[in-house]
Amino acid sequence: MTSDHRSDFPLTLDLLHELLEVDTELPARRLLTAARQVRGVLSPLVLSLAEREGTAMGTGARDELVRMRRRAETYRRLAEDLAGVPGARVVKGPSLARHYPEGTLRALGDLDVVVPSEAALWRVLALALDHHGSDEAELTVLDTPQRHLFAAVWWPGDDPLLDPDHGIEVTTFGFAGKPGLVPLRASLPEDQVLADVLSLAEERFQRPFTVKDVIDLVCVLTSPAAPAPRPLIAAAEEFALAPELLELCERVRACPRLAATVPEELVEGLRAPADAQLRHRVQAPAGRHEQHYGMQLTAPLRRGAGHQRTEHRWSEGVITRTPVADFLMVTGELVDPALHASALEQLAGLAPWPLRAAPGSAHTGGEV
């Protein structure tokens, strides 16, 4: 990762005190406690700033920082490997971290990857499983009316008792939107920085913006790679994210120290498309799409051959079989135990999914 994208914005513990509403007279320990209590993982950033500013740190804090740096490096290497899958694009995560000032650490929860096809989705997960064994997977099938997939695998962190799991989430769409409000949009902007910023804005459909989102936007807009206002406004308008991006910009500008990091031209240019999109959402709401969720039936995850799903239907339901695991498809969180038992019986009667060769093996039995 080169430094030519890094912001020179003065990101400091003092600024985080202000953003987290912690008295600057209080020690960094109190700031770290506050950071752990807000949504969005901020503790690695606090610890990296404490180290950079010469704050006294014990072995526990230093060890946590080492583990979080190792986590970031794991995702960075995996993102580099995924460049070999045609059309696969990593958004947010390491792509945003490259804008953070030297010596600071952006926390990475999981790796978000957008792919152009189902075949590419399974190739991406196969690469992840080549490096990290896993017991846990997720699958969601969306009919919009085009069929799209969300799939994820998770594996333990360096310290399974203290650290959140590592994970990779892969979609065949760029922006999920919100049923009844904003439709799914399959593509991403071609420009990576625009794709990252709009992916931040898209998060608003899932949750309120956080301090971490604020810092992400500030680091992008103060870096040498910052997009000019007009292309960013045009992209927000094209991908129906002007209201969300405007809200995030205004959240940043509400902090006096950060207000100048968001160009006035950007904020004013977003107002008209944001108003128009909000009116459109009321007047012509997006249709709701069907979602079916996969209840995982098999573990540990397999390194299966092939790049497509198959379906096994019987009188009571549908089992979706994939290269990584088998799933009972359901429409909600509650599943009848009798249906689950019946699915396991059905699965026991099916042929094993063929496995592909291990990386570096001379035997190629199975598609890789």
Image (cartoon, rainbow, N blue to C red):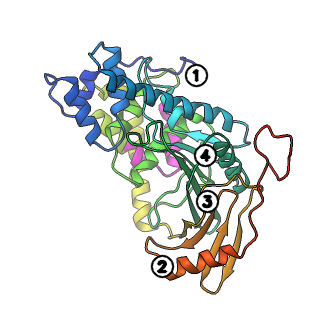
Disc 1: which residue: 1
Rendered image quadrant of residue 32: top left
**Marks 3 and 2: CB-CB under 8 Å?**
no
Amino acid on which the number 3 mark rests in the picture: Leu
Location of mark 4 (residue) = 133
Side of 69 where 192 appears, left or right: right
Q: Distance between the residues labelled 4 and 3?
A: 22 Å
Q: Quadrant of residue 20?
A: top left
Tell me which numbered mark, 1 or 4, is placed earlier along the sequence. Answer: 1
Quadrant in the picture for residue 62: top left
> Is 177 situated above or below 228?
below
Q: Residue at x 64, y 39 (%)?
A: 131
Nearer to us in this view, 181 or 81: 81
Q: Can residue 255 be seen in this view?
A: no
Which residue appears at 67% of the width and 51% of the height?
Answer: 121
At x 68%, y 79%, the residue is 313
Spatial CA distance of label 1 from label 4 is 26 Å
Look at mark 2 in the image and give the residue it sits on.
337
Assign a secondary structure to mark 1: loop
Which quadrant is home to the N terminus? top right
Along the viewing direction, whichever of 260 and 289 lies nearer the viewer? 289
> Secondary structure under badge 2?
helix
x and y percent of residue 229 in the render?
Answer: 47, 32
Q: Which of marks 4 and 3 is nearer the N terminus?
A: 4
Q: Nearer the viewer, mark 3 or mark 2?
A: 2
Check contact, mark 2 vs mark 4: CB within 8 A: no
Image-based side of 33 in relation to 216, left or right: left
Q: Nearer the viewer, mark 1 or mark 2?
A: 2
Q: Give the range drawn in magenta.
A: 229-246
